[in-house]
Image (cartoon, grey):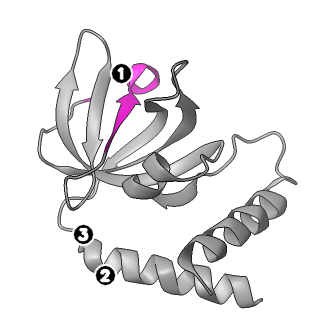
Amino acid sequence: MSSAAAAVKFDYFYEKQMSSFASLPPPGCIKTVEEICNERVPKTARVIGRLIERDIKSEKGILSSRDKRHSLTINTRLIEPFQAKINCLYQVIGEVDVSRDQREVIITVRTAVCVEGTDLIAYEKALQFQREYLYTR
């Protein structure tokens, strides 16, 4: 089974299981920066990326993928004051929006945690194993 097919089925399973918690904000589907930039965009997402840029006035920042080929914009207005450290690894959970011109993905962050020290290669392998396991259930 392809990784993309497993991810799509996992997203469906995840949203179906979490629909019973209607009064709570939806949990984020675990995605990588590359998946958010290249694939179908979920309503909410949990993403790990390196914060490479931060603009306090506009309340925005940019998360980069592990290989630095992909990046996405985060809107931090809901979590200000956000004491961010540039070039640190952050896990963010929030609502995903696509800009009007369909060129930029923006995550409005509900929560952000510094996860500096996380082994991203091992994290991505574990994510792949989890998706494959849940797909077979």
Percent coordinates x, y for residue 76 in the rendering: 38, 26
Q: Is residue 62 left or right of residue 99?
A: left
Percent coordinates x, y for residue 124 in the rendering: 38, 75
Q: Which mark is residue 132?
A: none
123 over 104 or under it: above or below: below
Q: Marks 2/3: CA distance?
A: 8 Å
51 over 124 or under it: above or below: above
Identify residue type, mark 2: Ala
Residue assigned mark 2: 122
Callout 1 secondary element: loop
Callout 3 secondary element: loop
Tally of numbered discs: 3
State which region is magenta.
Answer: 71-82
116 over 135 or under it: above or below: above
Measuring 76% from the left and 57% from the top, which residue is drawn there?
15
Q: Nearer the viewer, mark 2 or mark 1?
A: 2
Q: Is residue 106 left or right of residue 134?
A: left
Of all residues, the one furthest to the top in this rendering is 57
Residue assigned mark 1: 80
Q: Which mark is residue 118?
A: 3
Identify residue type, mark 1: Glu
Q: Quadrant of the C terminus?
A: bottom right
Q: Marks 3/1: CA distance?
A: 24 Å
Residue 96 located within the stretch drawn in magenta: no
Residue 74 located within the stretch drawn in magenta: yes
